[in-house]
């Protein structure tokens, strides 16, 4: 009897070893993502860019707004005349401009501002738009979609009609008109709450109003997706089971439904990030984005492309930065999709 | 189907109306008017009042809107307030064809490149053809119009000097009101803007075509078709291709919106006299009528475009029935 028990125990242990650790879907997704070299590389790149953006003052040789018109439109990596008597005072950091010394790795723009510094500071804008745009869209869209899908009936009808209506709008035209309106208001000045918003916007270099304009219309797709997911899940057995043991709506939504539907929503959102970055660059390019002198890659391209014949680096440097960051977010989005969407597994 | 189309058109009327109302209200709420001294030499106060009265700007907004609607009902898109030698109708009839030509050539290019590229990549899966096509496609999706345009100008206009870098190669009068004279000049001028606008689209179409063809090729009915001994060519062309294009049709909608965004940028970069450029200019100059009318046209085009996409969708996928 005792021997039998021992062998059973052994069997149980062997079985446990065979099974290995219990695996969660999230852990699977992370493992799958880590196997994807290109996606991992993109994430590393994005983290490096974030690091540069956060510590921009440390990594940039000059401020984004330091002008030295003597070196206007300096070409990248060409030697500059540094007068010998001041050579000692010329050092990499600090304020070498004060002594008439310049080292422009990527050249300088039309006002003699260091392009490297401006590109690094410009990454702040693109990353902020990526982060804030996607969070706003994810949060508003998910809340809206979940409410609409979960409660159904008349509420659902009304909420979805609103989304359908907004969906039919020419979004870009509306965004442009809204931004122009905000900017004109800011120029005219205002008091009270509007005045507070305008001050905040000024402090953020014109970003706030762009976020409002982008955020106001970017959650529509997310709301539809979230509602669809809720509709697909809310009749499933596990939700029935939760309800039968007396779980309330809150518990069902947050504890049961949300964890199950969040995957596809994250996929959708990560695929949308390049769009936000592109939209910001576009708005800045046509002069409706951030206010100068805040550097944004879109503004830098807009300032540079008219003189592209003689100074291609004014466009190529910020253009390369914009393309690389978008590329990284695209690869990351693809990686997340491949990792989370089980249909694509093993492809 | 006809009933569905009619219903969709009827439903979209309030949408378009609301957009125009919104635009009209916001634009009039903008500080400064067409005759105020924004960035210009000040106009004498009495003169400004006279000018504003002449265009009815002194009246309450709802009366102005009502008058605008009456104008629209007569097919009149309104007067230009600054450049009074022209009307909004003139401007639109000159610039609308440019945007349409640019947009449709770009969409055409996107499909001509994107669909075959996607098919080849899917058929030669995991070969160097596939890897190259996939990489180029991701790059194409990632490169923004505002980067690609100047880049193409630099390469083909400045360094190689083989293509013109600005202006549209055709001018009014248009054939049938919107077609260009297909001259050599037109085609050479069209190359760079059309490629700028079409690249991102063709890249996303290629990605989508590849993914959906791969999925279709793994389905049961394709196995059946192969099992009964059909040639691979027949299997792909007759059986797989049409179904694999269904998801591609779904992005036609966002694509149309993308064309709109793209024309704004491309017209700006290549100095084309299209609607996007007029739109931006009309905001700056507070040309209320031009701005409202262009918004109206954009919205109508978007509504019609989305309807067209849904019809194509139903044609490709017989399971979809509208009624």
Image: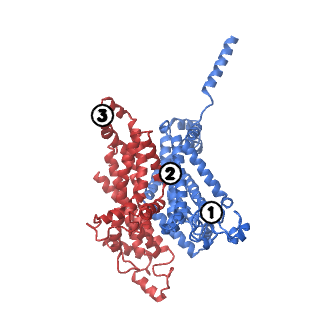
Chain colours: A blue, B red
Question: Around disc 1, counting alpha carbons within 10 Å, would you say few (fewer than 14), some (14 to 19), or many (20 or more)?
Answer: many
- Label at residue A222: 2
- Give the answer, above or below, for where A152 lies relative to A207: above
Q: In the rendered view, does B223 fall on the left or right side of A70?
A: left
Residue at which label 3 appears: B231
- In this view, the mark in front (2 or 3): 3
Helix, strand, or loop for circle 2?
helix
Chain letter behind tag 3: B
Q: CA distance from mark 2 to mark 3?
A: 43 Å
- Give the answer, above or below, for where B226 lies relative to A328: above
Quarter-wise, where is residue A115 in the image? Answer: bottom right
Which percent across, then down, holds residue B181?
A: 28, 66
- Label at residue A161: none
Helix, strand, or loop for circle 1?
helix
Asked if the residue at tag 3 contacts the one at tag 1, i.e. Cβ–Cβ closer than 8 Å, the answer is: no
Which percent across, then down, holds residue B304?
A: 35, 58
Residue A72 visible, this orientation = yes
Residue shown at 44% from the left, 78% from the top: B60
Q: In the rendered view, does A91 fall on the left or right side of B146?
A: right
- Label at residue A117: 1
Going from the N terminus, do you reach mark 1 or mark 2 first?
1
Q: CA distance from mark 1 to mark 2?
A: 36 Å
């Amino acid at each position: 009897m005792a021997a039998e028990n021992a062998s059973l125990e052994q069997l149980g242990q062997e079985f446990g070893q065979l099974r290995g650790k219990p695996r969660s879907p999230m852990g699977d997704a992370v493992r799958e993502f880590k196997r994807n070299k290109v996606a991992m590389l993109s994430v590393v790149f994005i983290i490096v860019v974030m690091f540069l953006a956060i510590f921009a003052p440390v990594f940039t040789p000059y401020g984004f707004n330091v002008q030295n018109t003597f070196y206007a439109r300096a070409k990248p990596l060409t030697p500059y005349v540094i007068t010998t008597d001041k050579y000692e005072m010329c050092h990499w950091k600090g304020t070498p401009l004060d002594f008439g010394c310049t080292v422009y790795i990527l050249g300088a723009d039309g006002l003699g501002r260091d392009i490297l510094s401006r590109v690094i500071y410009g990454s702040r804008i693109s990353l902020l738009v990526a982060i804030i745009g996607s969070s706003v869209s994810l949060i508003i869209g998910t809340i809206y979609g979940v409410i609409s899908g979960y409660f159904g009936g008349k509420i659902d009808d009304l909420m979805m009609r609103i989304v359908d209506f907004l969906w039919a709008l020419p979004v870009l035209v509306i965004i442009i008109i809204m931004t122009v309106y905000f900017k004109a208001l800011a120029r005219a000045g205002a008091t009270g709450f509007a005045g507070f918003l305008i001050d905040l916007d000024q402090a953020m270099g014109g970003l706030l109003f762009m976020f409002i304009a982008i955020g106001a219309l970017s959650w529509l797709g997310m709301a539809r997706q979230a509602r669809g997911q809720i509709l697909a899940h809310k009749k499933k057995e596990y939700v029935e089971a939760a309800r039968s043991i007396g779980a309330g709506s809150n518990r069902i939504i947050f504890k049961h439904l949300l964890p199950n539907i969040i995957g596809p929503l994250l996929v959708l959102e990560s695929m949308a990030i390049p769009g936000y970055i592109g939209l910001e660059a576009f708005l800045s390019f046509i002069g409706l984005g951030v206010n100068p002198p805040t550097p944004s890659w879109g503004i830098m391209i807009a300032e540079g492309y008219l003189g592209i014949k003689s100074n291609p680096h004014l466009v190529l440097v910020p253009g390369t930065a914009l393309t690389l960051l978008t590329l990284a977010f695209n690869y990351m989005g693809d990686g997340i999709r491949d990792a989370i969407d089980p249909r694509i597994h093993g492809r | 189907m006809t009933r569905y189309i009619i219903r969709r058109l009827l439903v979209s009327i309030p949408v378009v109306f609301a957009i125009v109302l919104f635009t009209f209200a916001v634009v009039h709420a903008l500080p400064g008017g067409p005759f105020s001294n924004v960035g210009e030499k000040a106009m004498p106060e009495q003169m400004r009042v006279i000018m504003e009265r002449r265009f009815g700007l002194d009246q309450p907004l709802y009366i102005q809107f009502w008058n605008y609607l009456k104008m629209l009902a007569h097919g009149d898109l309104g007067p230009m307030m600054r450049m009074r030698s022209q009307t909004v109708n003139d401007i639109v009839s000159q610039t609308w064809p440019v945007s349409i030509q640019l947009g449709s050539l770009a969409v055409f290019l996107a499909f001509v490149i994107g669909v075959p590229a996607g098919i080849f990549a899917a058929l030669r899966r995991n070969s160097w053809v596939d890897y190259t096509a996939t990489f180029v496609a991701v790059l194409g999706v990632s490169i923004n119009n505002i980067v690609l345009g100047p880049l193409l100008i630099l390469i083909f206009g400045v360094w190689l000097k083989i293509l013109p870098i600005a202006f549209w190669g055709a001018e009014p009068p248009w054939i049938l009101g919107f077609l260009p004279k297909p001259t050599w000049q037109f085609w050479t001028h069209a190359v760079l803007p059309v490629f700028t606008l079409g690249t991102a689209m063709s890249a996303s179409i290629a990605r989508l075509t590849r993914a959906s063809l791969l999925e279709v090729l793994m389905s049961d009915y394709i196995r059946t078709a192969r099992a009964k001994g059909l040639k691979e060519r027949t299997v792909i062309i007759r059986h797989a291709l049409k179904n694999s294009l269904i998801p591609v049709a779904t992005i036609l909608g966002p694509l149309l919106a993308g064309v709109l965004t793209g024309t704004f940028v491309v017209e700006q970069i290549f100095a084309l006299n299209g609607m996007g450029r007029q739109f931006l200019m009309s905001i700056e100059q507070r040309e209320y009528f031009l701005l409202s009318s262009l918004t109206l046209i954009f919205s109508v085009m978007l509504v019609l475009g989305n309807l067209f996409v849904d019809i194509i969708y139903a044609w490709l996928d017989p399971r979809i029935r509208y009624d």
